[in-house]
Image (spheres, rainbow, N blue to C red):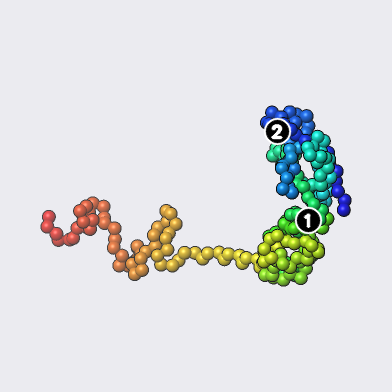
Amino acid sequence: MEVGKLNAQFRGDIGKSAVRRLRAAGKIPAICYGQAKQPMPLAVDPAELLKSLDPVKKTNTVLTLTIAGAPDGEGALTVMVRDYQKDAIRGHVTHADFIRVDLNKPVHATVPIVLTGKAEGVKLGGIMHQVIRVLPISCTPDKIPVKLEVDVSALGMNEAIHVSDLKLGEGVRPLPDPGSTVCAVTAPKAEKEAAPAATAEGAVPAEGAAAAPAAGAAAPGKEGAAAAPAAGGDKKGGAPAKEGGKK
């Protein structure tokens, strides 16, 4: 299998001031761990690190790491990049983690899932939902696939593809639960119907609107409705004075 190559230097001084001097010199701090050995602090060139990675495999690239000044004769290690951090503003690499690997033993890796074809359910108006975009797997370094292509052409409405349905290469084991959904086609939600005007008895009027008359009450202005008191009427009762009343 193809491997990349990268040079590194052993770091004896791991203090904050040493890290500042390291970055001022154009290098970044790194660490290599794994295989039940003590973590080894390193210094690497960030530009050379990115160049050493396969443009397709990226962090799944197996690297031969040549270490200057390494103790115990560990001058050359077979490693993979477990992770690297980038500056949030400038975007350049600020730190890297390497892990020792044995080409004959399984490692954990993640590979992208790419959907191909157009599902039958989508042709009928359904919506495709991809739940898992990156699949964690376990296999030997030489069997790590670049990507997993999943043909969804036969997927109908309200049907799904699960992890157990994926066709992986020999020796490749998925780490998520087999019943986990990779993708599914669902029917589109029905549009909400416009709410009818509130005409039912007891409906609350809009703010500032006149309240609707109660059932059985006479509407103002109709025959039989009580007239408003005339100006100058009895203020106490509010009703007009009767004819023939005592003066």
User: At 47% from the left edge and 64% from the top edge, which residue is drawn?
Assistant: 198
On the image, which quarter does residue 25 sit in? top right
Spatial separation of the CA atoms under disc 2 and disc 1: 31 Å
Q: Eyeballing the image, is 159 above or below 115?
A: below
Residue 13 is tagged as none
User: Percent position (x, y) of residue 240?
Assistant: 22, 58
**Residue 179 screen position, x and y as percent:** 67, 66
Q: Residue at x 75, y 65 (%)?
A: 166
Q: Earlier in the sequence, mark 2 or mark 1?
A: 2
Q: Secondary structure at mark 2?
A: loop
Q: Which mark is residue 14?
A: 2
Residue at the right extreme? 2
Q: Residues within 10 Å of mark 2 (few under 14, many from 20)?
A: few
User: Height in image: 151 above or below 52?
Assistant: below
Q: Nearer the viewer, residue 18 or 131?
A: 18
Q: Tell me what residue is drawn at x 74 percent, y 49 percent.
A: 35
Report x, y in % for residue 177.
Answer: 67, 63
Which residue type does callout 1 highlight? Answer: Lys
Location of mark 1 (residue): 105
Please state which amino acid type lies under the numbered disc 2.
Ile
